[in-house]
Amino acid sequence: ARVANGMSQLADLDVWVVDASRLSVEEIRSIAERHKQENPNLSLIMADYLGLIEKPKADRNDLAIAHISGSLKAMAKDLKTPVISLSQLSRDVEKRPNKRPTNADLRDSGSIEQDADSIIMLYREAVYDENSSAAPFAEIIVTKNRFGSLGTVYQRFCNGHFVACDQDEARQICTASNAPAARGRRYAQGADV
């Protein structure tokens, strides 16, 4: 409910878009500082997405991502403004039966997981099985929340848009479609029960 309320509040905010590519985290900070100075009520900074931020020179990719992640966290603290950064998942999620994402699925996840106050994942069963009873729903999964609880909010997914739905009904459908099929157990003399 809090996520849904938050989403409706975001719709009423003024939005500025900086349509530039390959910015460094330092350039992003400079732009954000200027916007904050001109608009002291700046309420959110969003970076779309972490992998497109110009990486500093580093021996390993995870160290470069750690620099970016830590710098975004510092910017949020210094400007007293939340920063949302999108991140790509690793391909390992495709290799397991349950495709629902976890924090470990974040590409170069160690520093992202450490620096983030909250991590929110999206999951749609329809991506993997369009005939599933859960196909009409999207799951908004809070997998980390330093200042609150974890959980899942369900939304209907219609033509690329999230639409509010009955949470209990959606939870029941989505968890039932994700339950493993019942298998008989072998007891005495190989009989299935």
Image (cartoon, rainbow, N blue to C red):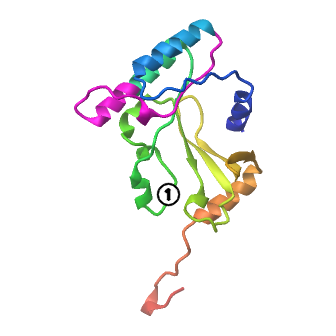
Q: Which residues are magenta?
A: 40-68
Name the secondary structure under disc 1: loop
- Would you identify the image quadrant in which residue 37 lies? top right
Residue 54 lies in the magenta stretch = yes
Left or right of residue 125, residue 165 in this image: right
Residue at 67%, 36% in the rendered image = 3
- Would you identify the image quadrant in which residue 73 lies? top left
Q: Is residue 129 above or below residue 108?
A: below
Left or right of residue 52, residue 8 in this image: right
Q: Residue 117 location, x and y as percent?
A: 51, 29
Q: Residue 186 location, x and y as percent?
A: 46, 84
Q: Residues within 10 Å of mark 1 (few under 14, many from 20)?
A: some
Q: Nearer the viewer, residue 88 or 188?
A: 88
Q: Is residue 95 above or below residue 66?
A: below
Check the picture and name the quadrant holding the N terminus.
top right
List the residue tagged with mark 1: 99
Residue at 65%, 59% in the rendered image = 174
Q: Residue 172 location, x and y as percent?
A: 69, 59
